[in-house]
Amino acid sequence: MKDAFGLPQSLLVLGGTSEIALATVRRLIARRTRVVWLAGRPSPALETAAAELRALGPEVHTVAFDALDPGAHEEVLGKIFAEGDVDMVLLAFGVLGDQAGDEREPAAAVRVVQTNYTGAVSAGLVAARALQAQGHGSLVVLSSVAGERARRSNFIYGSSKAGLDAFAQGLGDALHGTGVHVMVVRPGFVRSKMTEGLPETPLATTPESVATAVELGLRRRSETVWVPGALRVVMSALRHVPRGLFRRLAL
C-alpha cells in the first residue's frame, strides 16, 4: 500500500531501462519504495539497471516485456500482480524514431507509432484493470509536450504521443472513483541518451527533474504534470498560434 504521503511501496516499470523511469525509481526508493519490477526486453542494460537499484536496498525483479507484443501483455503483467499488490505502474517505454528516415520508410514510422501508442494502449489497459481489481494504485504515463501540437520536425513521434496523451486522459476519467489514480506527465526536451546529439529546445530538463515532478504529483494526486511547469503556459500559447504562422516557426 502507499504510505501516508501517497508514495508507493511497490512499483512496476514498463520500460525498465528508461533513464527517466530509473531516475524516478531511485527517488522513490529514497522515500518508501521497497519492491521494484523492471519490465523490458531482456538485455545487459536491464540487468545492470536492476543490480544498481538492488544496491540501494529494495527487492528488485526483472521480467521480459515487449511493447510490440500486445498478445503477451496480459500474461506477463498478470504474473507480476499475482505476486502481490502493485502500488504504482510507471508506463515509460517509447522510441523517438528518425523523422527524416521514417518519412522515407513508412514501416519504420509504423513501428514508432506501434511502440509509443498501440503498445501503450494494450499495456495501459491491462495494468489499469489489474489496479482496479486490487482497489488501489496509480498509473503514471510518460507523455510529452510533443503531443500537444504536431511540429514539422517530429510529427510522427508527436502524433504517437498525442494519441497516448488522449488515451491516458480518457482512461483517467474512466477510472475516476475506482481508487485508481492516473497521472499524465508531459516533459519537454529531456537531456538523455535518447536525445543525445539533438538540438535542445527552450526549457530543456533532465531525468532527475522529471522524477522530482513525478514525486510531487503523486503527493498531490495530480492528474497532469508539466516538466518544467512553465511549459503549461508556453504550450497553451502555441496551441492557439495560427497554422500559417506556426508553420514558419523554427520548431
Image (spheres, helix red, strand yellow):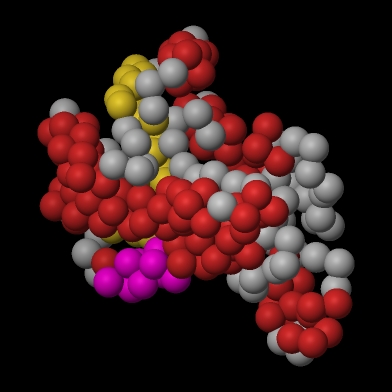
Residue 44 shown left or right of residue 4 in the figure: right
Question: How far from the left and from the top, in percent, is residue 99?
Answer: 66, 54
Q: Out of 114 and 237, give the one closest to the viewer.
A: 114
Q: Out of 165 and 249, give the one closest to the viewer.
A: 249
Q: Out of 105 and 133, give the one closest to the viewer.
A: 105
Query: Residue 153 is drawn in which quadrant?
Result: bottom right
**Measuring 27% from the left and 71% from the top, which residue is drawn there?**
174
Question: How far from the left and from the top, in percent, is residue 60?
Answer: 36, 19
**Measuring 69% from the left and 53% from the top, which residue is drawn there?**
100
Q: Is residue 69 above or below residue 143?
A: above
Query: Across the whole image, how many numbered discs are drawn on residues?
Result: 0
Residue 184 shown left or right of residue 8 in the figure: right
**Does residue 250 show up?**
yes
Question: How far from the left and from the top, in percent, is residue 6?
Answer: 40, 48
**Measuring 46% from the left and 42% from the top, which residue is drawn there?**
93
Q: Is 176 contained in the magenta span?
A: no
Residue 124 shown left or right of residue 231 in the figure: left
Q: Which residues are magenta?
A: 166-174
Q: Quadrant of the N terminus?
A: top left
Query: Residue 16 is drawn in which quadrant?
Result: top left
Q: Is residue 32 above or below residue 227?
A: above
Q: Is residue 24 above or below residue 91?
A: above
* Magenta span dominant secondary structure: helix
**Does residue 56 show up?**
no
Question: How far from the left and from the top, in percent, is residue 239?
Answer: 69, 80
Q: Quadrant of the C terminus?
A: bottom right
